[in-house]
Image (cartoon, helix red, strand yellow):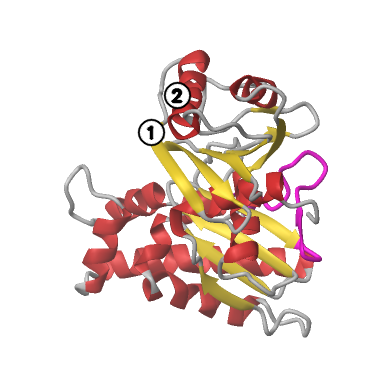
C-alpha cells in the first residue's frame, strides 16, 4: 500500500497543508492566510487547514516546517514573522491532529532545500543550498545528500548573513543582513528612498515590471539586491563546500533581473578553486517546495 502523509508549511503570510504520497505527489491541498492575532488563533488556522485536507483520511506520520527560529530538540518555534508564537509547542500540538502519528518538525528553509533536492532543481546534488527570496530571505542546507539542520534546527539561515556593515536594522535584531537588502519589501523600500514613484501597494512584482521597462531606479534596486544574494551565497559556499544554490520565492520570479547580478557577485567573490564552479539554478517546485520537503522527512527513512 502506498503511504500518504500530512505535510504542513507554516509561514508568516500563509499556511499550507497537503496529503503527499511516496512519489511526492500532492493529492490534496489547502492554503489559508496566516492570522495576525494571538497564538491560539494562529494554531487554529493551522489545525483547520490540516483538517481540510485530512477529511476522513488516517495518516501515520506528519511532516511540518515553520518559519524560524525553531528549536527542534524542544519541538518549539519562535518565528520572527509570527510574533504571537514564542516558544510555541508546535510538535506537541501537531500530535493532536492525528492520534498516534509520528511528527517530524524542521525549519522552512531546510524543508525547501530538501524538497528541491528530492524532486526539484537540486536532484543529483549532494552539497546544496536552498534559498527563498520573498517577503523575507531564508534558506537551508543539504550536505552529503542529507538535510543539515545544525545544532538547533536553524542551520542555513542565509537571510541573516551580513552584507552591509552599516546597513538597515533587521527584524532579527542585527543590522545589514541580506534580508534588509534583498527581500521584496525592503527592495521596494530602498527604491522609494532613491525616488521611485509607485502606488502605496507596490511590491517586488511592480518593481520588476518597472525594471523590465527600463526604469533606472528599479534596475539599480535589483542589481543591489542580487549582488547581496550572491555575496551571501559565496560566503555560505566557501564555508560549506557547496556545488549548487537553488533560489526560489516571489522575488526570484523576476528572473535574470535577480539572477544576473547574483552570478556577477559570485564571479567576484567565489574565487577559491573548490567553489569556482558553483552553479545557480531557479527553484523548480515553486510554492510546494517546503511542503514536499516536510513530506520527505515523514516518508523517507534514508534522510
Crowd class of label 1 (few under 14; some 14 to 19; many from 20; radius 10 Å): some
**Closer to the observer: label 2 or label 1?**
2
- Taking 10 as reference, is 2 above or below it? below
- In terms of image quadrants, where is residue 224? bottom left
- In terms of image quadrants, where is residue 125? bottom right
Q: What's the residue at 59%, 31% (across, down)?
A: 58
Q: Main secondary structure of the magenta part?
A: loop
Which residue is at the front of the view, 266 or 7? Answer: 7
Which residue is at the front of the view, 19 or 189? Answer: 19
Give the label on residue 32, or none. Answer: 1
Which residue is at the front of the view, 286 or 258? Answer: 286
Crowd class of label 2 (few under 14; some 14 to 19; many from 20; radius 10 Å): some
**Disc 2 and disc 1: Cα gap in Å?**
9 Å
In the rendered image, the quadrant that contains the C terminus is bottom right
SS of the residue under disc 2: helix
Q: What's the residue at 45%, 53% (across, down)?
A: 287
Amino acid at each position: 500500500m502506498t503511504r500518504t502523509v500530512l505535510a504542513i508549511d507554516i509561514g508568516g503570510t500563509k499556511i499550507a497543508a497537503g496529503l503527499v504520497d511516496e512519489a511526492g505527489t500532492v493529492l490534496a491541498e489547502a492554503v489559508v492566510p496566516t492570522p495576525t492575532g494571538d497564538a491560539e488563533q494562529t494554531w487554529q488556522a493551522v489545525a483547520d487547514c490540516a483538517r481540510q485536507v485530512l477529511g476522513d483520511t488516517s495518516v501515520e506520520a506528519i511532516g511540518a516546517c515553520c518559519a524560524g527560529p525553531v528549536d527542534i530538540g524542544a519541538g518549539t518555534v519562535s518565528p520572527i514573522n509570527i510574533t504571537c508564537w514564542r516558544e510555541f509547542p508546535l510538535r506537541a500540538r501537531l500530535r493532536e491532529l492525528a492520534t498516534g502519528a509520528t511528527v517530524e518538525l524542521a525549519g522552512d528553509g531546510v524543508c525547501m532545500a530538501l524538497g528541491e533536492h528530492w524532486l526539484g532543481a537540486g536532484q543529483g546534488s549532494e552539497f546544496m543550498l536552498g534559498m527563498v527570496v520573498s517577503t523575507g530571505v531564508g534558506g537551508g542546507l543539504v550536505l552529503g545528500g542529507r538535510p543539515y539542520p545544525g545544532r538547533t534546527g536553524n542551520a542555513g539561515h542565509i537571510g541573516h548573513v551580513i552584507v552591509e556593515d552599516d546597513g538597515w536594522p533587521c527584524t532579527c535584531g542585527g543590522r545589514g543582513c541580506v534580508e534588509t537588502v534583498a527581500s521584496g519589501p525592503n527592495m521596494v523600500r530602498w527604491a522609494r528612498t532613491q525616488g521611485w514613484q509607485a502606488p502605496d501597494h507596490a511590491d517586488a512584482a511592480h518593481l520588476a515590471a518597472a525594471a523590465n521597462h527600463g526604469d533606472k531606479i528599479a534596475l539599480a534596486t535589483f542589481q543591489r539586491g542580487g549582488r547581496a544574494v550572491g555575496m551571501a551565497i559565496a560566503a555560505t559556499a566557501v564555508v560549506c563546500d557547496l556545488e549548487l544554490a537553488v533560489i526560489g520565492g516571489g522575488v526570484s520570479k523576476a528572473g535574470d533581473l535577480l539572477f544576473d547580478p547574483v552570478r556577477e557577485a559570485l564571479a567576484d567573490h567565489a574565487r577559491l578553486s573548490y567553489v569556482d564552479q558553483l552553479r545557480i539554478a531557479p527553484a523548480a517546485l515553486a510554492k510546494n517546495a517546503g511542503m514536499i520537503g516536510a513530506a520527505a522527512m515523514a516518508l523517507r527513512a534514508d534522510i
